[in-house]
């Protein structure tokens, strides 16, 4: 990744649980990494898999979940200039709890769509299973774009709260404020985000 020329990008981060923050990430656009491996034309999706070691990550012993964590993007989402593969944040290398060795950042989607601790990337023809969609398909759909008009089944997404501002709510921005860069990708697709 470093050989591709690291850069810093400051992106908004929006959690599905309605909290938000702004993060200075260090990395490269994911499309630069994808260009190096030259996926076959039949690749329509990118599948990410994270590390799996229940002896180190005790939460991976929790029953009811299909480990390792898996996530996926459409190929055009992965190739979008905004999609970022990171090796650091706040001017330092990623720590284990922040997602070393690699973390994917998709700032127009809810945070769980950006897997951390990625150890495997595959290019596949069919939509891959994803961790949260497998765990609860009624609440977590494949696209998971930030949309204030589409509530989570258990809470509204119309407002968000920045970390550190415990009593102040802000209006959620469509595509988390990145609509000018990503909305065109969804013009012909069903607007089902949950």
Image: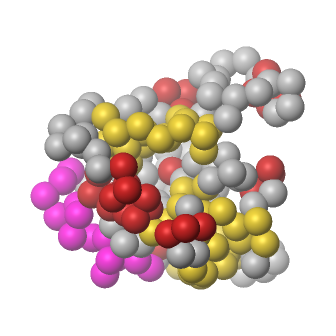
Query: 13 or 160: which is nearer to us?
Result: 13
What residue do we see at 18% from left, 38% from top?
42
On whether residue 126 falls in the magenta region, the answer is: no
Residue 155 in the image: above or below residue 122 = below
Q: Position of residue 156 (x, y in %)?
A: 53, 59
Residue 166 in the image: above or below residue 131 = below
What residue do we see at 41% from left, 37% from top?
122
With 193 as the anchor, is 170 left or right in this view? right
Query: 54 or 174: which is nearer to us?
Result: 54
Q: Where is residue 93 in the image (x, y as percent from the top left)?
A: 76, 65
With 51 as the anchor, is 82 left or right in this view? left
On whether residue 179 falls in the magenta region, the answer is: yes
Tell me, what colour scheme is on the image? secondary structure
Which span is picked out in magenta? Answer: 177-190
What residue do we see at 66% from left, 62% from top?
87
Quadrant in which the N terminus is drawn:
bottom right
Residue projecting furthest to the top: 63
Toward which corner of the image does residue 24 lie, by quadrant? bottom right
With 191 as the anchor, is 102 left or right in this view? right
What residue do we see at 72% from left, 52% from top?
100
Could you tell me what secondary structure mostly forms the magenta stretch?
helix
Query: 21 or 151: which is nearer to us?
Result: 21
Query: 41 or 131: which is nearer to us?
Result: 41
Q: Where is residue 191 in the image (x, y as percent from the top left)?
A: 26, 55
Toward which corner of the image does residue 67 lie, by quadrant? top right
With 67 as the anchor, is 167 left or right in this view? right
Residue 92 in the image: above or below residue 170 = above
């Amino acid at each position: 990744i470093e050989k591709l020329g690291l850069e810093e990008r400051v992106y908004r981060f929006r959690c599905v649980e309605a909290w938000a923050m702004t993060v200075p990430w260090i990395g490269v656009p994911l499309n630069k990494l994808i260009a190096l491996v030259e996926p076959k034309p039949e690749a329509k999706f990118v599948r990410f898999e994270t590390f799996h070691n229940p002896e180190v990550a005790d939460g991976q012993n929790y029953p009811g979940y299909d480990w390792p964590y898996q996530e996926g993007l459409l190929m055009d989402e992965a190739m979008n200039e905004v999609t970022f593969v990171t090796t650091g944040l706040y001017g330092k290398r990623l720590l284990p709890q922040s997602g070393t060795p690699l973390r994917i950042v998709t700032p127009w989607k809810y945070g769980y769509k950006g897997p951390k601790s990625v150890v495997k990337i595959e290019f596949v023809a069919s939509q891959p299973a994803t961790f949260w969609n497998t765990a609860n398909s009624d609440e977590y759909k494949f696209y998971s774009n930030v949309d204030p008009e589409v509530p989570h089944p258990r809470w509204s997404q119309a407002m968000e709260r920045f970390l550190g501002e415990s009593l102040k709510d802000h209006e959620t921005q469509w595509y988390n404020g990145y609509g000018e860069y990503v909305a065109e990708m969804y013009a012909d697709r069903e607007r089902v985000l949950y």
